[in-house]
Image (cartoon, grey):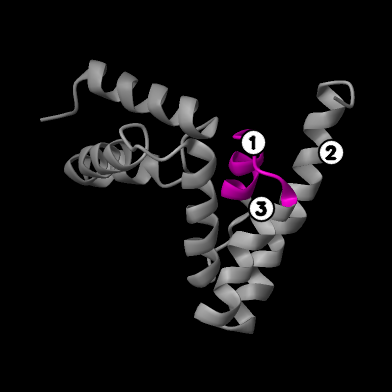
Amino acid sequence: MGMSKELREEIAAYFKEEMGNEPSSIPSLERYSLGALEGFYRLRKATTVESSLPKKVRELIIVAVETALRKDPTGHARLAVEAGASPQEVHDAVALCLWLAGMPAYHEGMKAVAAAEEHTVRLQGRRGGA
């Protein structure tokens, strides 16, 4: 039995609102494991939209976790900037990983800082430098 059209539209709308688009893993989950897709969506929604933490704080935490795991944190760094974080705040989230996960993780996290700097400039350009 497939996923209802309504639930699939709800999932698509959620990711568009939260991330601008769906993660690349969603089509694979939809094709091979509808239950995992629904579970992932409901868990992610429960820990993001339904969280008491502001989006900026959530995104900075995700940047730190991805840095510690040495997973590319640039996408969430951009989302953090869009939620109001400065490149300095992104760096501070990354810097926590220096003593928690070591210099290799910090180096990975610096990708997030560079992405935050670039995205800040891009957003300021759209706003006319404001």
- Specify which label sits upstream in the sequence, 3 or 2: 3
Q: Which residue lies furthest to the top in this view?
A: 6
Can you tell which quarter of the image residue 34 is in?
Answer: top left
Where are the magenta residues, as a range? 75-87
Residue drawn at the location 57% of the way across and 83% of the way down: 102
Q: Which amino acid does label 2 sit on?
A: Val
Q: Which mark is residue 121?
A: 2
**On the image, numbered disc 3 is attached to which residue?**
89
Indicate the position of residue 36 as horizontal and vertical percent values.
Answer: 22, 46
Report the side of 108 relative to 1 (left or right): right
**On the image, numbered disc 1 is attached to which residue?**
84
* Callout 2 secondary element: helix
Can you tell which quarter of the image residue 13 is in?
Answer: top left
- In the rendered view, would you say 47 is above or below 96? above
The answer to whether the residue labelled 1 contacts the one labelled 2, judged by CB atoms less than 8 Å apart, is no
Report the side of 4 relative to 115 (left or right): left
- Observer-side mark, 3 or 2, equals 3
Q: What residue type is labelled 3?
A: Glu
As for residue 111 lying within the magenta part, the answer is no
Residue drawn at the location 36% of the way across and 32% of the way down: 49
Residue drawn at the location 33% of the way across and 28% of the way down: 11
Q: Which amino acid does label 1 sit on?
A: Gly
Indicate the position of residue 114 as horizontal and vertical percent values.
Answer: 77, 56
